[in-house]
Every structure is written in C-alpha cells, then in structure tokens.
C-alpha cells in the first residue's frame, strides 16, 4: 500500500470517528430531560457528554478539512468580500462561495428546526437562533463586508442579553452582606449583580455564537470552492 493510500485510509477512519461522535453526541445532549431551563437531576451527564462528543466530532471534521484542503487556504479565507474587491478573488469563485453560503443557510435552518423539535428549552432556542443568524451573518459579510456581520452580532447579542437578564429568577428571600477589607459596604439580595451578569453573559454568548458560526461557514465555503 502506497503512502498516499495510507493517508487516504487514515483520513477516512478519522472522518468516520468524527461523524460517529457528532451523530451520537447531538441526540445524547438533546435527550437530557429539562424542567424549564434547568436540567433534571441525574440527566446532566447526558448534556455534558453529548456536548463534548459533538464538539470533538465537529472540530475534528473542521481540522481534517483544513489539512485536506490546506492548498486552498489563503489569507482572505475569512473575508471573500475584500478579496473580491481587491481582485484577489475571481468573480466566478466569489459567486460560487455566495451560492454555497445560501445552501448553508438552508441547512442551518433545517437543523435548527429539527433540534427544536427534539429538544425545546430556552438554551436550544438561543442555539437555534444563533445557527440561523450565523448563516445570515456569513451572507452579510460576503456581500457587504465584515462590518455588517459585526453589527448583526452586536445587535443580536444585546437582545439575547436583555432577554436573559429579564428572564433570570432572583431569590429575593436571601440577603447578602458585602465587605471590603472587613468593612461592610452594602447589603441586598443580589438582584443588581444577577441582572448585570445575566445581561453580559447572554450578550457575549449570543455575539460569539453568531460570529463563530458565520466565520465557520465562510471558511468551509471558501475552502471547498475551486478557482
């Protein structure tokens, strides 16, 4: 067996393992029972293990794609719009990338709906919205530049943060005392701190989710599009 055949066999085996992890991790995470936004006691292992499996599988496939298609990687892989404007990307390849991003948007929408049918709670709603908006962001970035993607990410992140903060339940029956170097500086039930942490945490989650998915789609669509 030649070295080329051995490399091809190794890639096939690795891809198979990643697909199994991805295909097994998502249903496992979705099978975790929830009450509202909380995972039922004894079910957390399914969510944690499922997310880990899906993450390893997904990032593994991305890594394999980078290795297999490394000869197509360019410094403009994250910004086909600028590359096209500066004549570093042909019109044909640019249009082909845009068409693949439209297909990616459709696929993301279908996957988001399927996920919500199988696993419906506040977190899955945010994840589904992030998947769809991320795909929309990839189209915006390749059509109008990275500024439009950043605007979408910031705007959506603020909305997610506000929703997260307003929906956070605060146990007002508990009172806390705050000390600095042994000196009491205040007391309360933590409402302001919980609101602020939920606001910032939700905003950061929404922003990173959309930007990450958008750039992932852009990278994949650019790499698999031939000149």
Image (tube, helix red, strand yellow):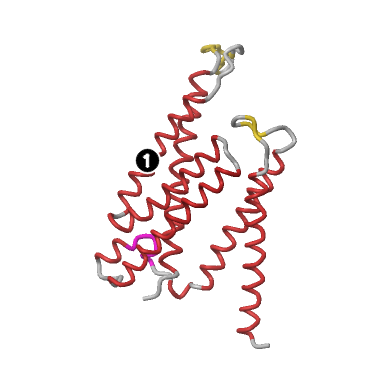
Which span is picked out in magenta? 75-80
Relative to 158, residue 76 above or below: below
Percent x, y of residue 79: 35, 60
- Is 76 magenta? The answer is yes
Residue position for label 1: 154
Percent x, y of residue 26: 62, 50
Instruction: Find the residue positioned furthest to the bottom.
Output: 2
Relative to 132, residue 67 above or below: below
Q: Is residue 143 left or right of residue 25?
A: left
Relative to 154, residue 104 above or below: below
Given residues 87 and 108, the one toward you in this image is 108
Q: Quadrant of the N terminus?
A: bottom right
> Residue 160's image quarter?
top left
Count of numbered labels shown in the rendering = 1
Relative to 93, residue 109 above or below: above
Describe the element under mark 1 as helix, strand or loop: helix
Residue occupying the point 45% across, 75% down: 71
Given residues 216 and 116, the one toward you in this image is 116
Q: Quadrant of the C terminus?
A: bottom left
């Amino acid at each position: 067996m030649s070295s080329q055949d051995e490399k091809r066999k190794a890639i096939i085996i690795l891809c198979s393992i990643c697909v199994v992890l991805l295909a097994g991790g998502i249903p496992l995470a979705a099978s975790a029972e929830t009450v509202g936004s909380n995972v039922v006691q004894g079910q957390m292992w399914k969510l944690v293990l499922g997310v880990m499996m899906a993450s390893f599988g997904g990032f593994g496939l991305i890594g394999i794609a980078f290795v297999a298609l490394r000869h197509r990687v360019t410094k403009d892989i994250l910004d086909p719009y600028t590359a096209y404007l500066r004549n570093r990307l042909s019109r044909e390849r640019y249009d082909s990338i845009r068409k693949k991003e439209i297909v990616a948007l459709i696929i993301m929408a279908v996957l988001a709906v399927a996920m919500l049918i199988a696993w419906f709670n506040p977190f899955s709603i945010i994840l589904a919205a992030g998947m769809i908006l991320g795909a929309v962001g990839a189209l915006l970035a390749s059509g109008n530049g990275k500024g439009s993607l950043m605007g979408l990410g910031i705007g959506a992140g603020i909305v997610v943060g506000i929703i997260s903060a307003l929906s956070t339940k605060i146990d007002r029956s508990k009172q806390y005392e705050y000390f600095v170097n042994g000196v009491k500086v205040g007391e309360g039930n933590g409402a302001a701190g919980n609101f602020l942490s939920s606001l910032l945490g939700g905003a950061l989650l929404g922003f990173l989710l959309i930007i990450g998915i958008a750039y992932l789609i852009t990278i994949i669509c650019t790499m698999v599009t031939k000149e």
